[in-house]
Image (spheres, grey):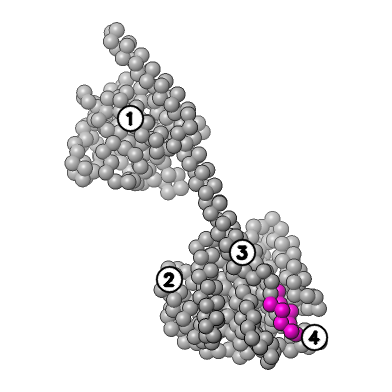
């Protein structure tokens, strides 16, 4: 009897000691090792594993455990003995593993090990949320008993809170790093956008971009060449965020190089499209307008690869042509057949508007889109203003329309106006 009391006292002191250690700042992986080691020691088990609960995917996974020969094991949270423990939030004591229907003997075969008995204990946090499962295998002398269950329950209650805290700390640190990296990526992408639009005699140009995330899937450019020629570009990668941002940044780099090498629009389209087919995944593509403003002839020659609608405001009549795309989006299939659309002929006072669908498709609180018609009316009503002012008018109207609705997509505007003089 005295030995039992001393043994119980030793166990309690060991749990108190580990509680003290768990209260200090400690990395999650180190904490997992400590929990497993203490549980094995106190309950005299050969092996132990902590399965953490991934709520988003409804899975249990282990990164640390005795006898684990792979970096991570992961399985559905309602599978196996650990899954029963997780689902019921109760201790599962299995005196004979091979007689239990939830036991998978294939794991023993793979690891060259013989599991005799299992004790699975739920790890429940302060808010009664499941943190994971502590699983112990093969007590050194016979199966686990009711006293082992009580000890495991006390130990688990202490470990669960500490693990919950450590996981939150890890997630916070990871989030902070991602935020830092995204901020850096946003700064790099911003630097790729033109600081100002080219000054071309007889023309007024404006460009603006507002991503939905820290990095965006939209990008624009305007580069002047000899004889009053200006490359006009607006590209929109499917989706928004870091992946599309990388795609349009790659596309922008290819277009700039091609024009520096004096490629014509047809060759530029062919080479960039074929390269994107190789580089982009099957579900990714880029819509783009690639055009050349020739101020000498007051024309814009172009390819609109899935980028539409294009708006051409005619100052003389007040009419607006709504032009469709002239080719398929880039990156879908190689060697796309290409026919050049009719050039856009810019008469005095005319405005050509390149606008991404983030403007047209911005919804209000009731789900109604801003639409093309509102955009056309704003261009018509403000056609006498400088193009930078028209951009501001459009954006202000979109913000007013949206109300409390969030910005769902990146927004980009490029405006070209021929002076009335």
Mark 3–mark 2 Cα distance, whole angstroms, equals 23 Å
Bounds of the magenta segment: 198-206
Mark 1 Cα shell of 10 Å, populated few (<14), some (14-19), many (≥20): some
| Residue 296 image-quadrant placement | bottom right
Residue 154 pos. (x, y %): 40, 23
Q: Which residue position holds label 4?
A: 420
| Distance between mark 4 and mark 1 Cα atoms | 81 Å
Residue 87 shows in this picture: no
- Judge whether 12 appears above or below 320 on screen: above
Residue that label 2 marks: 279
Q: Earlier in the sequence, mark 2 or mark 4?
A: 2
**Residue 31 visible in the picture:** yes
Q: Earlier in the sequence, mark 3 or mark 4?
A: 3
Q: Nearer the viewer, mark 3 or mark 2?
A: 3
Q: Quick one: SS at disc 3?
A: helix
Residue in the image at 52% along x and 80% along y: 258
User: Does label 4 or label 1 sit earlier along the sequence?
Assistant: 1
Q: Is residue 210 above or below residue 325?
A: above
Residue beneath label 3, please? 190
Q: Where does the image place residue 390, in percent across and percent down from the top left?
A: 75, 72
Decide if residue 43 is on the left or right side of residue 328.
left
Q: Nearer the viewer, residue 398 or 233?
A: 233
Measured Cα–Cα span from mark 2 to mark 4: 45 Å
Instruction: Compute the Cα span from label 1 to label 3.
Output: 50 Å
| Residue 302 image label | none
């Amino acid at each position: 009897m005295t030995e039992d009391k001393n043994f119980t006292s030793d166990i309690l002191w060991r749990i108190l000691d580990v509680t003290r250690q768990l209260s200090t700042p400690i990395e999650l992986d180190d904490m997992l090792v400590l929990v497993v080691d203490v549980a094995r020691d106190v309950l005299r088990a050969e092996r132990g594993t902590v399965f953490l609960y991934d709520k988003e995917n409804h899975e249990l996974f282990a990164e640390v455990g005795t006898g684990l020969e792979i970096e991570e094991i992961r399985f559905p949270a309602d599978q196996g003995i650990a899954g029963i423990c997780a689902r019921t939030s109760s201790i599962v004591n299995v005196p004979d593993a091979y007689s239990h229907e939830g036991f998978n003997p294939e794991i023993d075969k793979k690891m060259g090990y013989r599991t005799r008995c299992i004790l699975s204990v739920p790890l429940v946090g302060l808010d009664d949320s499941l943190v994971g499962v502590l699983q112990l295998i093969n007590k050194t002398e016979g199966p686990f008993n009711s006293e082992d269950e009580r000890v495991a329950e006390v130990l688990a209650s202490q470990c669960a809170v500490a693990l919950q805290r450590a996981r939150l700390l890890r997630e916070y640190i990871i989030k902070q790093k991602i935020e830092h990296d995204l901020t850096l990526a946003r700064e790099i992408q911003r630097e790729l956008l033109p600081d100002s639009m080219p000054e071309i005699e007889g023309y007024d140009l404006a460009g603006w971009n507002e991503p939905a995330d820290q990095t965006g899937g939209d990008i624009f450019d305007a580069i002047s060449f000899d004889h009053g020629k200006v490359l006009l570009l607006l590209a929109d990668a499917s989706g928004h965020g870091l992946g599309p941002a990388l795609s349009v940044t790659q596309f922008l780099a290819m277009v700039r190089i091609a024009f520096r090498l004096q490629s014509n629009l047809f060759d530029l389209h062919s080479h960039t499209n074929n390269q994107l087919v190789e580089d982009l995944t099957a579900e990714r593509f880029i819509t783009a307008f690639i055009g050349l403003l020739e101020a000498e002839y007051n024309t814009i020659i172009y390819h609109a690869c899935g980028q539409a609608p294009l708006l051409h405001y005619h100052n003389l009549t007040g009419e607006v042509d709504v032009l469709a795309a002239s080719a398929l989006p880039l990156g879908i299939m190689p060697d796309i057949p290409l026919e050049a659309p009719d050039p856009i002929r810019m008469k005095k006072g005319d405005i050509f508007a390149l606008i991404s669908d983030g403007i047209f498709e911005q919804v209000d609180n009731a789900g109604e889109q801003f639409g093309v018609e509102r955009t056309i009316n704003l261009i018509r009503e403000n056609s006498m203003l400088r193009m930078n002012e028209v951009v501001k008018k459009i954006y202000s109207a979109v913000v007013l329309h949206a109300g409390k609705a969030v910005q769902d997509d990146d927004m980009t505007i490029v405006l070209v106006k021929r002076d009335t003089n």
